[in-house]
Amino acid sequence: MESLIVNILDLIEQLKFWKKKKKRRDFEKENNLPRKLMIQPLTIIIFILLIVVIVFRLIKHLK
């Protein structure tokens, strides 16, 4: 049951991101701006967690 809830919340988050990205791309096109790099929120969270794990492993290894 909880995996279903997580999947639904993830889907909602992805849809919000794609909607925001489409709006941003339309704005860039209208105003002749360069394309801005947009990263999904889930990717950012995974990257931060990976860095935290690596740092803790290094700290543990150095002791």
Image (tube, rainbow, N blue to C red):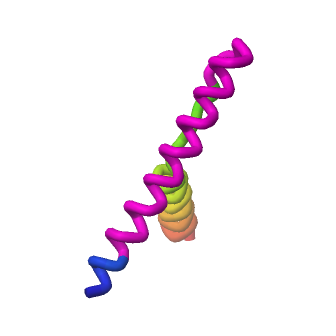
Q: Is residue 1 above or below residue 10?
A: below
Quadrant showing the N terminus: bottom left
Residue furthest to the top in view is 32
In the image, taking residue 28 as reference, residue 5 lies left or right, namely left
Give how far across and how far down residue 7 sits, in percent.
32, 69
Q: For residue 58, say whether it is visible.
A: no
Residue 3 point in image, percent of width and height: 28, 78
Q: Is residue 42 above or below residue 59?
A: above
Residue 29 forms part of the magenta stretch: yes
Residue 14: image quadrant is bottom left
Using the image, determine if residue 9 lies above or below residue 55. below
Q: Is residue 51 magenta?
A: no
Q: Residue at image x 57%, y 66%?
A: 59
Q: Nearer the viewer, residue 8 or 37?
A: 8
Number of disc labels = 0
Query: In percent of the image, x 49 and y 64: which residue is there?
Result: 53
Query: What range is drawn magenta here?
Result: 6-35
Q: Residue furthest bottom?
A: 1
Q: Residue at x 71, y 16 (%)?
A: 33
Front one among 9 and 49: 9
Between 30 and 49, the residue placed more toward the observer is: 30
Q: Is residue 22 above or below residue 27?
A: below
Q: Is 33 on the left or on the right of 10, as rendered?
A: right
Main secondary structure along the magenta-highlighted residues: helix
Position of residue 28 measured from the top left corner of the image (x, y, whole percent): 67, 22
Q: Quadrant of residue 6?
A: bottom left
Which quadrant of the rendered structure holds the C terminus?
Answer: bottom right
In the image, taking residue 1 as reference, residue 25 lies left or right, namely right
**From where the camera sits, is residue 14 visible?**
yes
